[in-house]
Image (cartoon, rainbow, N blue to C red):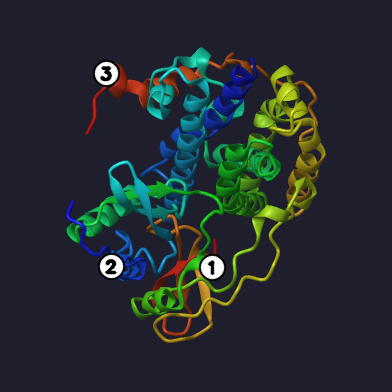
Amino acid sequence: MLLDDKFEYLLRLGDNALILSQRLSQWCGKGPAFEEDMALTNTALDLIGQARMWLSYAGEVEDRGRDEDALAFLRDAHQFRNLLLLEQPNGDYAVTIARQFYFDTWHCLLLQELNKSADSRIAEIAEKALKEVRYHLRRSSDLVVRLGDGTAESQRRMQAALDDLWMYTGEMLTPDEQDELLAAQNIVPDPAILREPWLQYVGSVLRETKLTMPTGTWMQKGGKLGRHTEHLGYVLAEMQFLQRAYPGAKW
Amino acid sequence: MVAIDRPTTEQIWSWLGEVPDPEIPMVSVVDLGIVREVEWLEGEVGAQCVVTITPTYSGCPATEVIAQSIEQVLREHGIPVRLKNRISPAWTTDWISEAGRAKLRASGIAPPARKAGDVSVIDVSGLKRGREPAPAVVCPHCGSENTTVTSQFGSTACKALYRCTDCLEPFDYFKCH
């Protein structure tokens, strides 16, 4: 039972990185500026690397012969454990940045805690990923400030994006049974301890601008248990096409 | 295998010192601190040279090419080689050698301007907005400290784009990591 719980949790970590990476790579060649295009694709690359480490470990823990590729390309939407936030469409640039900013803040806080995990492999992967994610957070925070302090139009769009995605943030900060089981064994942190620092940091960045913190309390949930929005299927259709059409294809 | 004198680890380090990084070929994988350990171990099929390497960034596409190049070079010297991958402690630009920094500079890439922070000691309360003054990045062309960042990401995961406001040349900066 313990192994299944750990496997499920590793899928959450791996799928978060994988699905956001896939979303970001959809910007490749379409970024609003050359520098942004490179930044998004480099961020996507870091996340792909992290997804590989988490999913490889998940496959080893599961011990049924599935490797990182089998887990990435041969599972269907209901078997994915990523946060709903990360499968949301790219929207305009403000939406992409708001999604990134909410996630990076949480991701950074989470990895800092996972770095102290009683599971040494989790601690090692977290240590490696954290260095990259801190850079992501610095950049997404800067961009929230730039768009929030930019023109009336950029401010309006940034505020709308923060408001629209707000209902997807609760899932990161609310523990479920799986989180609690593993937290009790010091393998992962209780998500509830990330809540205050997350609110505090997000608030501190928004206060640098004319943007206001969304206040809604009703939150979407389900991604961690495999209940997804309709968007995930389209992401997977694109990402998995080759392995579905030509099973086992290598190049 | 005939029992020939097996090369010393020093000799192997020096061969590895000639294996170029595939994306920044002016520096070697040893200069960058990617090779962490070289040792001879007795295996089932006799002595094996075990080379421990570490990836720079998680998604760096050069990692696999580096492993292949190392294997190839050592095999050419007749050495039975096995590669081991290690991710902790995580690679840091602090491991780039002085020689490596000089080679980067000579080829127009500014080396990291300061020590990377220790990430292992921060906890949940430590998340702060990065407001530390940016380190002065010295232009590798003219030596000026009057430089500005034009993009936080560059042509590879490990670099950012800068521009010198004195000589006006753009250049790559190897980010602190």
Q: Secondary structure under badge 3?
A: loop
Is residue A213 found left or right of B30 in the rendered image? right
Residue at x 57% of width, y 16% of height? A228
Closer to the camera in the image, A26 or A214: A26
Classify residue A225 by image quadrant.
Answer: top right
Classify residue A76 by image quadrant.
Answer: top left
Classify residue A250 by image quadrant.
Answer: top left
Closer to the camera in the image, A6 or A44: A6
Q: Secondary structure under badge 1?
A: helix
Q: Nearer the viewer, mark 2 or mark 1?
A: 2
**Cα–Cα gap, marks 2 and 3:** 41 Å
Q: Position of residue B107 (x, y in %)?
A: 33, 76
Residue B168 against residue B78 in the figure, above or below: below
Closer to the camera in the image, A117 or B58: A117
Q: Residue under mark 1: which chain is it in?
A: B
Residue A247: numbered disc: 3
Residue at x 22% of width, y 54% of height? B72
**Residue A11 makes an appearance in the image:** yes
Q: Position of residue A198 (x, y in %)?
A: 75, 41
Say what amino acid the circle numbered 3 marks.
Pro
**Residue A88 makes an appearance in the image:** no
**Cα–Cα gap, marks 3 and 1:** 43 Å
Residue B15: numbered disc: 2
Q: Position of residue A61 (x, y in %)?
A: 53, 25
Is residue B126 found left or right of A70 in the rendered image? right
Q: Residue under mark 2: which chain is it in?
A: B
